[in-house]
Amino acid sequence: MFVTLITQAIRFGVVFLYGSTGETIVEKSGHLNLGIPGIMCMGAIGGCMGANIATKAGSGAFGVILATIFFAMLMAGMMGAVYGFFTITLRCNQNVTGLIITTFGAGTLGFWGSMMGREGTTFFESSKVFTAPMFGEVGSDWFSTIFLSHGVLVYVGIVIAIIVAIVLKHTRTGLSLTAVGENPGAADAAGIKVIKYKYTACILGAAISGIGGAFYLLDCTRGSLEYVIEAMGWLAVALVIFSLWRPNIGILGSFIFGLLYILPNYVEGVGFAEKEILKIVPYAVTALVLIVISFFNKKETQPPAGLGVNYFREER
Amino acid sequence: MEFTNVIEMVGITKAFGSNYANKNVNLDVRKGEILSILGENGSGKTTLMNMLAGIYFPDEGKIFVNGQEAIIRSPLDAFNYGIGMIHQHFKLVDLFTACDNIILGEKHSFDFKGAVEKIKAENDGTDKGKFLTVLKYMALPFVAGFDKAKFNLLGRKRAKKLQAEVDKYGFQLDLSRKIYDLSVSEKQTVEIIKVLYRGAEILILDEPTAVLTPQEIEKLFDVLRKMKEDGKSIIIITHKLNEVMAISDRVAILRKGEHIATVNTAETTERELTEMMVGSKVELNINRSEPGRPIPRLMVEGLTLKNMEGYYALKDVTFTARAGEIFGIAGIAGSGQRELLETIAGLYRPEHGDIYYVDPDDDDNEIDLKKKTPAQIRELGVRLSFVPEDRLGMGLVGNMDLTDNVMLRSYGKGHSLFLDRKSPKKVAQDIVDELAVATPSIKTPVRRLSGGNIQKVLVGREIASAPTVFMAAYPVRGLDIGASYTIYNLLNAQKEQGVSVIFVGEDLDVLLALCDRIMVLCDGQVSGIVDARTASKEEIGYMMTSLGGVDKSQNQEKGDENND
């Protein structure tokens, strides 16, 4: 029972991990993308379509996975590019743009889902590739169950988070990106191509988040038509704050969020209302983290200083 | 003597909307000289230099670097031409260490040509050699990729490695410290190292002395002279005429965006420069009248204040400001000036100490200001006009027009349901007329005005309310001479009307010429109160850096030795 709980926590947590890793990249460039929930929805559509196309074409497991990741990243990356065009080139308000994208993405997913339902298309077949344990059948001891029994995308998500964490902390690329988010004027004066970095971050971040949406539909729900990705997207945005803009902390944070997210389903002997209240806990925890880090008042734990402010070099 | 021009700017024009910031400017910079650029606020000095640094792109005109036409579209282009600018507001990332700021944006390209040459040279013509050559060519992209990846990785010991290089220049700075821990002059050092490290041959410094103490300015000038000896060309933007005379070889004067003249410093005088700069003869003397009836107006005793981080921002500050005198406060930026004024204005609660206000409307009774709210203190006539570094940060709302900004002080007074716009409108018009604020109309958002005009509005609004104690912090910050003197005259006029003026300033010459008494703050403590008519600049300078200024010369020298 306990082992199942932890295993499921990791599995659901990875949805948040994808979202928060992507959002961290975007926020590091100084753009607060509240469109992440919608982008994850679009990624889910892309991923599912990619998976079904590859499955129908009769390709093997590897091909299906590649097609899924590619199409999820493509759809989500396109939304990221739209967000980037509005906020970087046109310098629109970031919050408004993000919320529009969330509304658009969630609406599109709902529409697409009901179309699929009417057509009778399911993703159960293609999802088998993702739910199958990556390391084959493993023993039933607690270690194997918790760490080795997951589908391939769980490990991909964790690896991406680790890579992003290393790039951000230990490379010049990460240093430049952080500078762009902290003080775009300084980055520009240092000869960094600010606009290029911002666009890359917006598109790449969105693309990574998009895999999370596809992962949720194809792995967590086993291809069933359960379209509640938007709520998970908001938790992913909250996880960015929880992880203090560090994807490596985000890995741990995502497991905690995953645990809190599925906990209500495993608690026995409580009524419906209590379960619903339990679902609020992740948000409460994020609020708590905000309070705690405000006590320390350390500059390193603050959001990027340029977050939410659009950059224009010739600003007077 | 023959001079080589490293930079020539020909017919440069730049407009923002309908305003010309630069109009047909011609300027040349010689190799190995220090060129001062002098001009009033809004005369287009910074704009002109920003075009060299790649922040702005000129509308018309050409720039030649070393005789070649240069198109500078971004700061990166400027770097490639060897131009580095140290901006007035430092372009540093607070969160990074000094080292990371210096290496930020550094470019690295793989030397393909060199690699190809090397492969060719190693080819000995035999079959084996030819085969190896082909292999080497094929491996070249991977070698290049590996090289790039290796460069991209940040070593853990990068600060130490760089430290060794920086120490060679003779700068004293620990590169592993974070920028937010550094003092203003240390930040400036980081900026200078940064440009030098990136291989700049032409350095532009935008008002580098504005925030430094006299001693720090001397150190900076030494650095600049040393760089000049190395053959680097330096352009320095400043308002301060004495610095122009002290450091520069030539002076270029700009007025209203146009280039007036470039003269050799040795062949000119401060007065001549001022006339060229302002366009007419100006009175440089401040008329300091004897204080009228100097009765105590504001008494501060043993004021102690802890700031948000829990450090003492003020420690046991005691002074009395009298009516009809200008009481100056000197000190290095951040020595507690702001906290002191804001505590008097009622924005902070002090830990200990008393603030008494002698109310002239109430038979000179003493009123304890600690028990009053900020609004009540303002009602009593204790007015604060604080000009922060970014000018718009306190007191004015950038997006509102002049009338609305005046109304911020008076909207609470009305008794009807609707706002009374008529009287604030009149006050706003008066401020514009009396202080010669350059604005299209009083309906223009304050944000659109130039810095000096914003400050006139800020100061004018508080004066319009007929205060009894007028606290002006940095009212001339970044203003040109003409506008500064308008403000000084305003303060003098207030003084003659019996107002107790508290003036926080940066320029010691002005403090000495304007004030009656000067209190020097050092690290939140009173370093001393001197008579402005007898005190010297050096004396105050030492009091700013060490408490009481005791054993000043010896301490100072010792400190210098230790640094070396």
Image: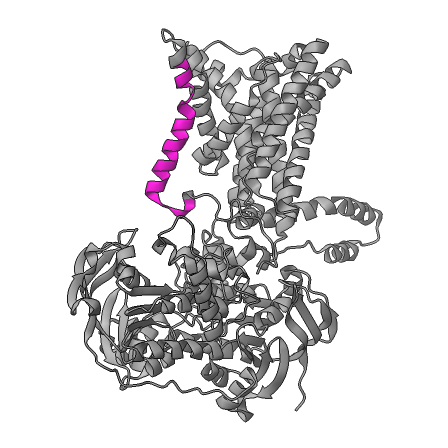
* Place of residue A126 in the rendered image (x, y in percent of width and height, measured from the top left): 67, 14
Viewer-proximal residue, B358 or B4? B358
**Residue B557 visible in the shown view:** no
In the picture, measured across the screen, residue B296 lies left or right of residue B404, that is left
Q: Main secondary structure of the magenta part?
A: helix
Q: Verify whether residue B434 appears in magenta.
A: no
Residue found 53% across the figure and 50% down from its top: A179
In the picture, measured across the screen, residue B359 lies left or right of residue B52, that is left
In this view, the residue farthest toward the front is B416
In the rendered view, tell whether residue B525 sits above or below residue B10.
Answer: above
* Place of residue B178 in the rendered image (x, y in percent of width and height, measured from the top left): 42, 55
Q: Verify whether residue A290 appears in magenta.
A: yes
Residue B466 in which image quadrant = bottom left
- Looking at the rendered image, the quarter that the N terminus of chain B falls into is bottom right
Residue B39 in which image quadrant = bottom right
Residue found 42% across the figure and 45% down from its top: A300
Give the magenta-colored segment's residue range.
A275-300
In the rendered view, tell whether residue B414 sits above or below residue B437.
Answer: above
**Residue B366 visible in the shown view:** yes
Residue found 45% across the figure and 51% down from its top: B95
- Looking at the rendered image, the quarter that the C terminus of chain B falls into is bottom left
* Place of residue B259 in the rendered image (x, y in percent of width and height, measured from the top left): 63, 80
In this view, the residue farthest toward the top is A269
* Place of residue B244 in the rendered image (x, y in percent of width and height, measured from the top left): 50, 82
Colour scheme employed for the rendering of this structure: one colour
Count of numbered marks: 0
Residue B448 in which image quadrant = bottom right
Viewer-proximal residue, B163 or A241? A241
